[in-house]
Image: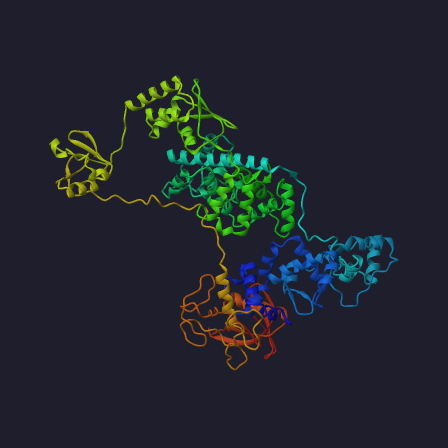
């Protein structure tokens, strides 16, 4: 079996290496040059900190116990580890945890037992599990006949931290400490502090490293909510958020708000939006952010900029309620925005505004998945903020999320209908599963998952009602959820007074005028109301519609982009009725004047093609030689709100990288079990004991391949895709990783550095210290120490 961590990494199969790169993506970015570099990078402090940051409390306990029991000594057996954790009956749970830690290369097996990854002690600190340092002398168990004062001192240090402050001289506690130091039960670290040795601490803990095992996630007590109640409340919230977003799109289509100079929506526009939606300002801010995340509204890019509906809003408005909700919830699941920070102040003291550019946080999608995962772990149970935060603290004790962020995400989930009455709803459970298993698939409205989400909501929505009961007092009642067509009619022609199991609306002069402004005629509106009412249209409503339509049509205002006029009316005869000119939008204003909806240059060209000689004229009526072409505006261009979701490289790229690393592996070892093609292939030797450096594409040499780069790997493949990838050349990250590996193992390495004359100098050095951008190393041949700036080091290779 492997004798070192590097050899253990080399012995992993291709599938295991791909799994490692998937679990720790930073190991493949940038691509390492060799498997030794990969192992050194996996043992670097930065990479281990990233891997440990999101480990749960149970896995951290196992790592701390392993560090405390091994500490550079013999490997630890799983049975001993389970006993030290106080979980001899939970051997299966310990094995499962160890398997995950092996997969992420935080624990490795040398054939005799388990060892922690190199560098793990630097990340977890000098006192794992609250245990002190290991003594060089043989361990001594604390005697049973300790004085009461001495026992109190040991009890205070037993479960950590193992560092104590020396009491003042002449006191009883000081005498107890001095006695313990004399007996070897305490160690002096300096004049003011003492340490409890690790062996004494383990003896006082009866061989345990922790008070109690914490291998399983807590299950806080919550309130059990029936599924029907959860889904009913979630359906109501989903319909409300869809209606609110629709109102924002319609309102901004009529009057676009102007963006602030620094970006974002102003306070007045936010208040106006809150009044429109009849909700508080935080809810209005979330609705605005949701519409922008879904791409329904965007900054038009002008100066000053305005927020306008996009072409995507046209398709969104044509979908039913469930389809609209699916687009919104998919956008929310992939969003990196933090609407709960709106109204707070940034580092400069400025108030954060809705749609502000500084509301992006890369960690939001991960925290959202964690919050939904907590709720999904206890289906049908309503959990509050403190209960969810308790589970999250167990899941990542080294990276506890802010409580304000957790509260904000829970509120957003309730507003969207992902939760109902505090518990995860049926559609919300599907959102949680999709976000956990396929986080990249919840792209805004473009994935098959959106259709599945829409179907899930349709199952919990109440049945649609296509009828409205019209009454003589200019009101109407919809006994249920209105159908999309009826809802569109109500939004245009009536004002909603109450909502609930039934919706009450009122018709007025302003509401009927709004319907007429949307292009409806008075007779058409009455006909549609009669078709959707089981009773005849009441006479007061009929009088209201006809009278409003008569006054609405008395004065007409239109728009014309250009016109054509002639001295002889016969020249223009038949042009407005010609079907071949229908695209010009010709309207007869007078016998000698036609208005058009196209620019004058286009109208001029169309008439010329029809055989009519025409001249261009200016506003003063004088003839022009030609019209100046106006500047074009790309009206489809929109600034994407929040950017595209970050996608990690796929397994194809990882497989290509692993094959490249196999080709760069030094000779002398058989391929591991399960390794892919080319595993264990020997690199040519230069005769000096060092492996030959991989050849760059296009330079010839062993393994030469002129194929293009493989996306996401930095490796190169053959044009046909049949050959293995050529390993990437070593970079600065590989050099640092090799130095850290050599420093940890006490090895000598070849260091290529830029000398005083600017040429490369190759020397065999033993690293002593790497800190502050400088390397202090020993040159065994010259028996001298030297200090080298890290930026002057070009490459590092192992001597062996």
In the rendered view, tell whether residue 528 sits above or below residue 241: above
From the top left corner, tell me how far across and down residue 647 is, in percent. Answer: 48, 54
From the top left corner, tell me how far across and down residue 46 is, in percent. Answer: 58, 60
From the top left corner, tell me how far across and down residue 498 is, in percent. Answer: 50, 25
Please state if 343 lies on the left or on the right of 389 as rendered. Answer: left
Q: Is residue 768 visible?
A: no
Where's the C terminus, which quadrant?
A: bottom right
Residue at point 35% right, 44% down? 636
Q: Nearer the viewer, residue 40 or 705?
A: 705
From the top left corner, tell me how far across and down residue 702 is, in percent. Answer: 45, 76
Q: Is residue 201 visible?
A: yes
Give the image quarter of residue 266.
top left
Q: Which residue occupies the extreme right position in the image?
A: 145
Where's the N terminus, which quadrant?
A: bottom right
Please state if 505 lies on the left or on the right of 155 as rendered. Answer: left
Q: Nearer the viewer, residue 758 or 116?
A: 116
Q: Nearer the viewer, residue 722 or 66?
A: 722
Give the image quarter of residue 628.
top left
In the rendered view, tell whether residue 639 sits above or below residue 421: below
């Amino acid at each position: 079996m492997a004798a070192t961590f590097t050899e253990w990494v080399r012995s992993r199969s291709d599938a295991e290496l791909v799994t490692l790169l998937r679990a720790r993506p930073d190991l493949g970015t940038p691509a390492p040059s060799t498997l030794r570099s990969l192992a050194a990078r996996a043992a670097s402090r930065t990479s281990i900190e990233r891997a440990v940051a999101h480990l749960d409390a149970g896995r951290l306990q196992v790592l701390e116990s392993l560090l405390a029991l091994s500490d550079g000594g013999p490997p630890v057996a799983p049975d001993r580890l389970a006993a030290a954790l106080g979980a001899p009956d939970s051997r299966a749970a310990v094995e499962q945890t160890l398997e995950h830690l092996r997969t992420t290369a935080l624990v490795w097996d040398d054939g005799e037992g388990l060892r922690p990854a190199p560098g793990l002690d630097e990340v977890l600190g000098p006192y794992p599990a609250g245990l002190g340092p290991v003594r060089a002398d043989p361990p001594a168990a604390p005697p049973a006949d300790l004085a009461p004062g001495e026992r109190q001192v040991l009890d205070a240090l037993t479960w950590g931290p193992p560092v104590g402050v020396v009491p003042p001289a002449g006191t009883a506690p000081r005498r107890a400490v001095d006695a313990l130091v004399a007996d070897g039960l305490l160690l002096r670290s300096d004049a003011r502090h003492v340490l409890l040795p690790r062996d004494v601490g383990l003896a006082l803990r009866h061989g345990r490293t922790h008070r109690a095992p914490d291998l399983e996630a807590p299950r806080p007590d919550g309130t059990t909510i029936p599924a029907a109640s959860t889904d009913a409340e979630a359906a109501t919230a989903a319909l409300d958020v869809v209606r609110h977003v629709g109102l924002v799109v319609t309102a901004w289509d009529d009057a676009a708000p102007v963006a602030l100079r620094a970006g974002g929506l102003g306070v007045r526009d936010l208040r106006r939006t809150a009044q429109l939606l009849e909700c508080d300002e935080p809810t209005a801010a979330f609705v605005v952010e949701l519409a922008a995340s879904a791409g329904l509204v965007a900054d038009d890019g002008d100066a000053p900029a305005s927020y306008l509906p996009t072409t995507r809003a046209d398709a969104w408005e044509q979908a039913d309620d469930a389809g609209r909700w699916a687009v919104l919830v998919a956008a929310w699941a992939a969003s990196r925005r933090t609407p709960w920070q709106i109204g707070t102040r940034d580092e400069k003291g400025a108030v954060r505004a809705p749609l502000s550019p500084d509301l992006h946080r890369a960690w939001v999608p991960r925290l959202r998945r964690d919050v939904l995962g907590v709720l999904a772990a206890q289906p049908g149970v309503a959990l509050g903020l403190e209960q969810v935060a308790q589970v999250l603290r167990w899941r990542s004790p080294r990276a506890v999320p802010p409580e304000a962020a957790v509260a904000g995400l829970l509120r957003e989930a309730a507003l969207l209908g992902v939760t109902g009455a505090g518990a995860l709803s049926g559609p919300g459970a599907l959102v949680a599963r999709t976000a956990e298993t396929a986080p990249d698939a919840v792209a805004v409205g473009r994935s098959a998952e959106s259709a599945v989400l829409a179907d899930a909501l349709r199952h919990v929505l109440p049945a649609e009602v296509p009828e409205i009961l019209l009454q003589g007092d200019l009101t109407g009642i919809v006994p249920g959820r209105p159908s999309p067509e009826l809802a569109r009619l109500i939004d245009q022609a009536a004002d909603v007074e109450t909502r609930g199991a039934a919706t009450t609306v009122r018709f007025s002069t302003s509401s009927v005028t709004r319907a007429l402004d949307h292009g409806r005629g008075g007779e058409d509106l009455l006909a549609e109301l009669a078709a959707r009412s089981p009773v005849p249209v009441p006479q007061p409503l009929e009088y209201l519609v006809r009278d409003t339509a008569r006054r609405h049509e008395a004065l007409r205002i239109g728009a014309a982009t250009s016109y054509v006029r002639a001295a002889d009316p016969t020249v223009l005869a038949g042009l407005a009725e010609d079907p071949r000119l229908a695209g010009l939008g010709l309207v007869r204003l007078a016998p000698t004047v036609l208005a058009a909806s196209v620019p004058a240059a286009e109208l001029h060209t169309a008439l010329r093609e029809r055989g009519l000689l025409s001249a261009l004229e200016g506003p003063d009526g004088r003839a022009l030689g030609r019209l100046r072409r106006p500047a074009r505006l790309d009206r489809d261009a929109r600034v994407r709100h929040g950017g595209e979701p970050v996608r990690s490289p796929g397994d194809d790229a990882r497989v290509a990288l692993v094959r490249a690393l196999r080709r760069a592996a030094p000779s002398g070892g058989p391929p591991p079990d399960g390794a892919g093609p080319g595993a264990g292939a020997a690199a040519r030797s230069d005769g000096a004991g060092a492996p030959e450096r991989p050849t760059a594409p296009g330079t010839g040499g062993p393994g030469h391949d002129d194929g293009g780069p493989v996306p996401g790997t930095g490796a190169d493949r053959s044009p046909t895709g049949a050959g293995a990838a050529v390993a990437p050349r070593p970079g600065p990250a590989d050099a640092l990783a090799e130095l850290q590996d050599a420093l940890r193992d006490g090895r000598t390495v070849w260091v290529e550095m830029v000398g005083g004359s600017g040429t490369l100098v190759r020397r065999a050095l033993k690293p002593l210290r790497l800190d502050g951008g400088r390397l202090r190393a020993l040159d065994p041949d010259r028996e001298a120490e030297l200090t080298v700036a890290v930026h002057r080091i070009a490459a590092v290779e192992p001597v062996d």
